[in-house]
Structures are given as structure tokens and as C-alpha cells.
Image (spheres, helix red, strand yellow):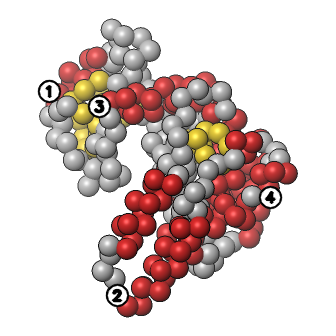
């Protein structure tokens, strides 16, 4: 359920007016679990998407909006945030003490794993490469979200768990693997702004083509091979790794952004660290 912060129609109308929108209806969307997402109905029959950021600070939400405003004109299929009428260049408003962003409505659907084809995997690879190219000129990339401090949080969380006996060995192995990366720092020559979370539910499709990339809240300064492997494991792993899908994604990526030798050499190591549940992290 995505309705974490109630939004009455009167509040939706007030917020919409800040962006020059004549709102006539507001419906909470059930997709997502972190933020409150709302479909706005507009006079004349149009729609818009409103997000109440439940975990982001105002500064964080504003940074996300500036990133999208940077990427969208540079070939990335990311929704362009709407700016406040009274403050051009400012994208974030406020509701219930939380930051709010408003975006154009993008029609589309997510793909289940069974519907991922080599063509779809190739399109995702191309889209990810465009994020890396366009993001290279974004000056505000947050520091890595997978650095030593974040790993330490994960380790402490794992060690505090009370688990069934059959999972204990797996968690011990995972903890050991994380410890190996406790001092991991992305190499400057193979890193830049990455999406970090380009899973299947963060891509919308329409008529067989990518309509939008969503949820850049995990975007940070990270290793490009790491981001590619996160995405590959998310899209190309069903009962096992599908080599055809993986090959198509890698080829799609390379068509837009050829992979330098220094990055190619790091793909295996980064793949062993890329989050994909216990299966991906443990390399099984």
C-alpha cells in the first residue's frame, strides 16, 4: 500500500495549483512501498503524478529532482519534474511536513520476468548506458550508497537476526562476503553517476518500447560495472542466469557506451557484490 501520508482532494488541488495544474481528482496508487504516490486527474482529462517523499529530506528530494531535470533533456527516458510557477527551477513543495514532487503522467506497464525478451534486455542496457553518459556531467552525484558505512549497517542487521537453522549458513556466508567489501571504494576511472536500482518495477513499457525509467532515489557516485551487474542480475536471472538475456543487455549497453577494458575487467568482481538478494550476493 503506497498511501502512507493521506492526501485529501483539497490538498491535492492546493499542491497542483503551485505547479499550474487544475486538479479535479486524486487517487492513491498501490504500487510502491516507500513513498506515497498519487494519480492526479486534471481539468480537461489529463493526468499527473504526485509523490510525497516519505524517507527523503527536502534537500534530498530537491537533489533527485535536479538530477531528473538534468537527465531528461540528455536522452534519458526519465520524467521531467514540474517546476513551481512562482519559483522557476524549484521543483519541490511541501505537504504534511514532507517534500512533494509532481511529474507528467507516463502511461506504461512493468514486465514480469517471463516477459523479458532479448530485445527488452537490450533496450534496458541501452537505457542504462544513457544514464551513465548523461550523468557524467551532473555535478551533484551523492556519494556511494554501498560504501563502508552502509555495509556496516547491513552487517549489524544480519548479525542481529534470529533465523531458521537452514538459513544460518547462508547468512554467515553473506556476512563474510560483505566484510570483504567493507573498505570498497569505487575506482575513479570506472565510476560516475549510476541509477543503482534499475529493477523491473522501475521501468515502464508501452508498445514494446521503454516509456520511462523511474525511482532515481538510489542514484549515487558508484562503479559503472557495478550498476551494469546490478541491472543484469535483476533482469536476466530467473531460475538461473539466462545467457541470451545477459548477452543482449551487454550488447545493448555497448552500442550506446562501449565498455572500456578497465571496466570489463571488473565485471565479475562487481557482479559478486551486486545486490540481488541472497542468491546474487552469495553467487549461487
Residue that carries the numbered disc 4 in the rendered image:
265
- Residues at marks 3 and 2, CA–CA distance in whole angstroms: 40 Å
Viewport quadrant of the N terminus = bottom left
Secondary structure under tag 2 reads: loop
Q: Position of residue 136 (x, y in %)?
A: 67, 32
Rate crowding at label 2 as few (under 14), some (14 to 19) or many (20 or more) other CA atoms within 10 Å: few
The structure residue drawn at horizontal position 45% and vertical position 29%, both measured from the top left corner, is 63
Residue that carries the numbered disc 3 in the rendered image:
99
Q: Say the numbered circle drawn on residue 64.
A: none
Q: Is residue 214 above or below residue 279?
A: above
Residue that carries the numbered disc 1 in the rendered image:
10
The answer to whether 242 appears left or right of 163 in the picture is right
Which is more toward the observer, 138 or 244?
138
Residue at far bottom of view: 165
Q: Say the numbered circle drawn on residue 164.
A: 2
Give whichever of discs 4 and 1 has the lower sequence position. Answer: 1
Rate crowding at label 1 as few (under 14), some (14 to 19) or many (20 or more) other CA atoms within 10 Å: few
Q: Marks 4 and 3: CB-CB under 8 Å?
A: no
Amino acid at each position: 500500500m503506497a498511501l502512507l501520508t493521506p492526501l485529501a482532494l483539497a490538498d491535492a488541488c492546493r499542491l497542483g495549483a503551485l505547479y499550474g495544474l487544475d486538479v479535479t481528482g486524486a487517487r492513491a496508487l498501490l504500487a510502491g512501498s516507500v513513498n506515497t504516490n498519487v494519480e492526479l486527474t486534471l481539468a480537461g482529462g489529463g493526468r499527473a503524478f504526485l509523490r510525497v517523499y516519505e524517507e527523503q529530506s527536502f534537500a534530498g528530494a530537491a537533489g533527485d529532482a535536479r538530477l531528473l531535470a538534468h537527465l531528461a533533456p540528455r536522452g534519458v527516458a526519465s520524467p521531467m519534474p514540474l517546476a513551481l510557477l512562482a519559483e522557476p527551477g524549484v521543483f519541490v513543495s511541501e505537504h504534511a511536513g514532507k517534500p512533494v514532487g509532481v511529474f507528467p503522467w507516463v502511461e506504461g506497464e512493468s514486465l514480469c520476468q517471463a516477459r523479458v525478451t532479448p530485445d527488452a534486455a537490450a533496450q534496458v542496457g541501452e537505457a542504462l548506458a544513457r544514464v551513465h553518459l548523461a550523468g557524467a556531467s551532473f555535478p551533484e552525484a551523492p556519494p556511494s550508497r554501498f560504501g563502508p558505512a552502509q555495509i556496516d549497517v547491513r552487517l549489524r542487521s544480519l548479525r542481529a537476526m534470529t533465523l531458521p537453522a537452514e538459513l544460518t549458513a547462508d547468512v554467515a556466508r553473506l556476512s563474510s562476503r560483505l566484510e570483504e567489501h567493507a573498505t570498497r571504494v569505487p575506482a575513479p576511472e570506472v565510476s560516475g553517476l549510476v541509477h543503482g536500482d534499475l529493477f523491473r518495477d522501475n521501468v515502464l513499457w508501452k508498445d514494446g518500447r521503454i516509456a520511462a525509467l523511474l525511482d532515481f532515489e538510489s542514484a549515487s557516485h558508484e562503479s559503472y560495472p557495478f550498476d551494469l551487474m546490478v541491472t543484469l542480475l535483476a533482469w536476466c536471472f530467473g531460475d538461473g542466469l539466462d545467457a541470451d538475456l545477459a548477452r543482449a543487455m551487454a550488447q545493448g549497453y555497448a552500442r550506446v557506451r562501449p565498455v572500456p577494458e578497465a571496466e570489463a575487467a571488473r565485471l565479475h568482481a562487481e557482479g559478486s557484490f551486486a545486490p540481488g538478494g541472497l542468491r546474487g550476493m552469495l553467487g549461487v
